[in-house]
Image (cartoon, coloured by chain):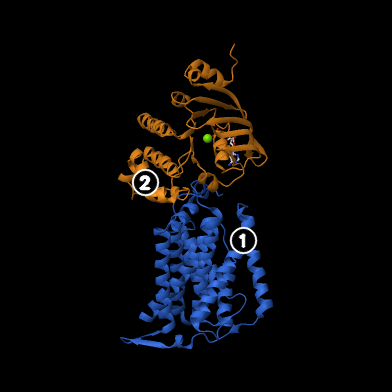
Chain colours: A orange, B blue
C-alpha cells in the first residue's frame, strides 16, 4: 500500500520556485533518504509535506487522503510528523513540557501515558532529565528529545531533516540505531541527510535532489556503491 | 507610609495585569495591540451603563462584553493580517484604536459618563492605625489572586505550555499539533478578561469614563512590557508592576510636582533600557513568525 504519494509538487517562497516538479511515493514501512547539495530545497520539501509551507501546485497524499494545503496542526493529527532541521527544541520549556506539546498533535489522547513510557524506553533522557530546561541538554540529548516529541504524536510517517547535524560520530551511531528501531517498529521514514553514507546503509531508496527535481533514484545496492552515488549526486553521466 | 506602599503595590499590580494582557497577544502574534486601550474603555463603559444592576452582575456582564470584543477584534481584523509585516500590524492596531474611540464618542458622547460604582468601595478600613480604602484593599487582593491564577495557567496547564511554545516559535508549535486559530483566539479572550479587570479597577478609582479612558494605562503598560522584556510573559508582568510602582511613588512624593511624574518615569525607563536593552527578563533573539 502507498502511504505517501507526492505528485508534481511545486513549492517555494514568494515568487521563487525552489521545488519544480517532485514526484515519488513510499510504501508503508519503507525508509527513503533524500540527499543533495546545500540550498537545493531538501528542507523546503519536508516543510511542504508537513504543511508548514503551502505548496504552489501538485498533490500530497497520506494514506490516500489529499493533505496538500492543509494546516500543519491537522497534518500531524492525520499521522505525519516532522523533526525539523536544527531540532527546534523549546529551550525555555522543560523536557517533559516539550513532550507534552507533542501530545497535542496526538489523535488518540487516551493512550498518552503509554506513549510517553514507550518513547522513554527508546530515549532514556526523557525520564532522567524530565524536569530540566530543554535548552540545557547536550546536542545529542536535544536530538533525542526532538525525535521523541515527534514520535509521541503517533506518526505513521516520520520526516527527519538532517538529524545528524552538529553531532559527534558516536552520538550519530546511537541516533541511527534508534532510527532503525523506529523503522523496524513499522514507522515509515523519510530522512534528509547531507552525509549520504549514513542513510545508504538502511534506506530502501535514495532520492537525489538537484535543481528543483529528483534527478536520480538509487536502490539500496546502488546507493552503497560509492562511485554510483557520487556520480548521481554531482550529476555526472554514467559514461563520464 | 504603609498606605503609600499599599497604593504603590496595588497600582503596580494593576499595571502588571494590563501588561500581561498586552503581552499575551504580543507573544502569539507579535502584535502590539493599541486597541487594548479600547477594551479597557468598553469594560469601563459597560460598568457605568449597567450601574443599576448588582455590582457582581454588572462586572460579569462587563467581562463577557470585553472578551467578546477582544475575540471579534481578532476574528474580523487581526486574523486577516496574520503574518503581515510588523509595521502593517502596528498601523492597523493604531487605526483600530482610533476608530473605536470615534465609535465610543458616537455612542456615548465625548463627555465623561460617570456613575457611582459601589459607593461602599470608598469607605475606609482602619487597622493598627493605618487606614486603607476598601477599593485599594480589594484591588490588591484581586490582582494578587489574578496574577497567581495567570501563573498557574501559564505554568501548569496545557494551554499555558502551548502559549509559551507558540510565543517562542509558532511554526514548530504548529508542527507538533498546536492549533493556531484556537490558541490565538484564547489569547485574545484572556487578554479581554484581563482588560475587564483593569477597566473595573480603574473605574472604581475614577468613575469618569470618556472615549480615551484606557489610553494612558495602555501606553504605560506597553512601556512596562518593554522594560520587562517584550518576549517574556513574566517579564511583561514584572515590567508593568515596576511602572505602576514607580508612577504611584512619584505621584506621592512629588506632591504638586506630580505633573513631572511621567518625565521621571521615562527617565527611569531609559536608564533601565540602557543597562538592559532587551528588557529585564529578555533572553535570546527573535524567531521567525508563522
Ligand atoms: N524562509 C525562506 N524564504 C526565502 N527563501 C528561502 C527560505 N528558506 C529557504 N530559502 C531558499 O530556498 C532554497 C532551498 O532552501 P532549503 O530548503 O533550506 O535547502 P536545503 O535544506 O536543501 O539546504 C535556498 O535557496 C534558500 O535560500
Ligand atoms: Mg536544509
Which residue is more in the foreground, B272 or A171? Answer: A171
- Between B119 and A146, the one lying in front of the other is A146
Beta carbon at label 1 within 8 Å of ligand 1: no
Q: Position of residue A80 (x, y in %)?
A: 51, 40
Task: Give the residue at x 54% y 57%.
Answer: B182
Residue B7: % across, % down: 42, 78
Q: Chain of mark 1?
A: B
Name the image quarter holding residue A17: top right
Q: CA distance from mark 2 to mark 1?
A: 38 Å
Instruction: Name the secondary structure under disc 2.
Output: helix
The single residue placed furthest to the top in the displayed view is: A239
Residues at discs 2 and 1 both on one chain: no
Marks counted in the figure total 2
Q: Is residue A59 visible?
A: yes
Q: Position of residue A21 (x, y in %)?
A: 64, 31
Q: In this rendering, would B214 be left or right of B237?
A: right
Question: Could one spot residue B1 in this view of the protein?
Answer: no
Question: Which residue was labeled with disc 1?
Answer: B75
Decide: is B260 above or below A106: below
Dot 2 crowding, Cα within 10 Å, few <14, some 14–19, many 20+: few
Q: Secondary structure at mark 1?
A: helix
The residue under label 2 is A114
Amino acid at each position: 500500500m502507498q502511504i505517501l504519494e507526492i505528485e508534481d509538487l511545486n513549492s517555494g517562497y514568494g515568487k521563487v520556485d525552489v521545488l519544480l516538479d517532485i514526484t515519488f511515493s513510499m510504501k508503508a514501512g519503507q525508509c527513503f533518504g533524500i540527499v543533495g547539495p546545500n540550498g537545493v530545497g531538501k528542507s523546503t520539501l519536508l516543510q511542504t509535506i508537513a504543511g508548514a509551507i503551502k505548496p504552489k501546485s501538485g498533490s500530497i497524499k497520506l494514506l490516500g487522503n489529499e493533505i496538500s494545503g492543509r494546516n500543519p496542526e491537522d497534518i500531524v493529527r492525520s499521522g505525519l510528523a516532522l523533526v525539523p532541521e536544527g531540532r527546534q527544541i523549546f529551550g525555555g520549556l522543560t523536557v517533559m513540557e516539550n513532550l507534552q506539546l507533542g501530545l497535542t498533535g496526538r489523535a488518540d489522547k487516551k493512550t498518552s501515558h503509554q506513549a510517553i513510557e514507550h518513547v522513554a524506553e527508546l530515549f532514556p533522557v526523557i525520564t532522567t532529565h524530565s524536569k530540566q530546561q530543554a535548552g540545557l541538554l547536550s546536542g545529542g540529548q536535544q536530538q533525542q528529545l526532538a525525535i521523541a516529541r515527534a514520535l509521541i504524536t503517533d506518526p505513521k510517517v516520520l520526516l527527519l531533516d538532517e538529524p545528524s547535524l552538529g553531532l559527534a560520530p558516536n552520538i550519530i551511531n546511537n541516533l541511527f540505531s534508534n532510527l532503525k528501531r523506529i523503522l523496524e517498529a513499522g514507522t515509515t521514514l523519510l530522512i534528509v541527510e547531507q552525509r549520504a553514507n549514513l542513510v545508504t546503509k538502511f534506506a530502501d531508496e535514495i532520492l537525489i535532489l538537484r535543481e528543483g527535481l529528483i534527478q536520480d533514484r538509487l536502490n539500496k545496492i546502488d546507493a552503497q556503491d560509492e562511485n554510483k552515488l557520487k556520480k548521481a549526486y554531482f550529476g555526472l553521466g554514467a559514461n563520464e | 507610609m504603609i498606605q503609600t506602599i499599599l497604593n504603590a503595590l496595588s497600582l503596580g499590580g494593576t499595571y502588571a495585569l494590563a501588561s500581561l494582557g498586552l503581552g499575551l497577544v504580543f507573544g502569539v502574534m507579535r502584535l502590539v495591540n493599541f486597541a487594548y486601550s479600547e477594551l479597557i474603555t468598553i469594560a469601563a463603559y459597560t460598568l457605568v451603563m449597567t450601574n443599576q444592576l448588582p455590582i457582581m452582575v454588572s462586572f460579569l456582564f462587563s467581562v463577557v462584553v470585553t472578551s467578546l470584543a477582544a475575540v471579534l477584534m481578532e476574528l474580523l481584523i487581526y486574523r486577516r493580517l496574520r503574518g503581515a509585516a510588523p509595521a502593517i500590524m502596528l498601523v492597523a492596531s493604531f487605526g483600530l484604536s482610533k476608530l473605536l474611540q470615534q465609535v465610543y464618542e458616537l455612542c456615548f458622547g465625548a463627555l465623561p459618563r460617570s456613575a457611582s460604582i459601589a459607593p461602599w468601595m470608598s469607605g475606609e478600613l482602619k487597622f493598627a492605625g493605618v487606614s486603607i480604602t476598601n477599593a485599594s484593599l480589594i484591588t490588591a487582593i484581586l490582582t494578587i489572586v489574578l496574577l497567581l491564577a495567570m501563573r498557574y495557567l501559564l505554568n501548569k496547564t496545557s494551554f499555558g505550555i502551548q502559549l509559551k511554545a507558540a510565543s517562542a516559535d509558532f511554526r514548530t508549535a504548529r508542527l507538533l499539533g498546536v492549533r493556531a486559530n484556537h490558541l490565538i483566539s484564547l489569547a485574545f479572550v484572556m487578554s479581554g478578561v484581563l482588560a475587564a479587570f483593569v477597566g473595573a479597577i480603574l473605574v472604581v478609582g475614577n468613575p469618569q469614563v470618556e472615549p480615551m479612558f484606557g489610553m494612558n494605562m495602555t501606553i504605560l503598560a506597553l512601556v512596562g512590557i518593554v522594560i520587562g522584556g517584550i518576549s517574556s510573559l513574566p517579564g511583561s508582568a514584572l515590567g508593568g508592576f515596576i511602572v505602576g510602582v514607580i508612577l504611584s511613588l512619584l505621584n506621592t512624593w512629588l506632591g504638586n510636582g506630580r505633573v513631572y511624574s511621567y518625565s521621571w518615569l521615562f527617565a527611569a525607563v531609559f536608564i533601565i533600557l540602557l543597562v538592559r536593552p532587551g528588557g529585564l527578563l529578555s533572553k535570546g533573539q527573535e524567531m521567525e513568525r508563522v
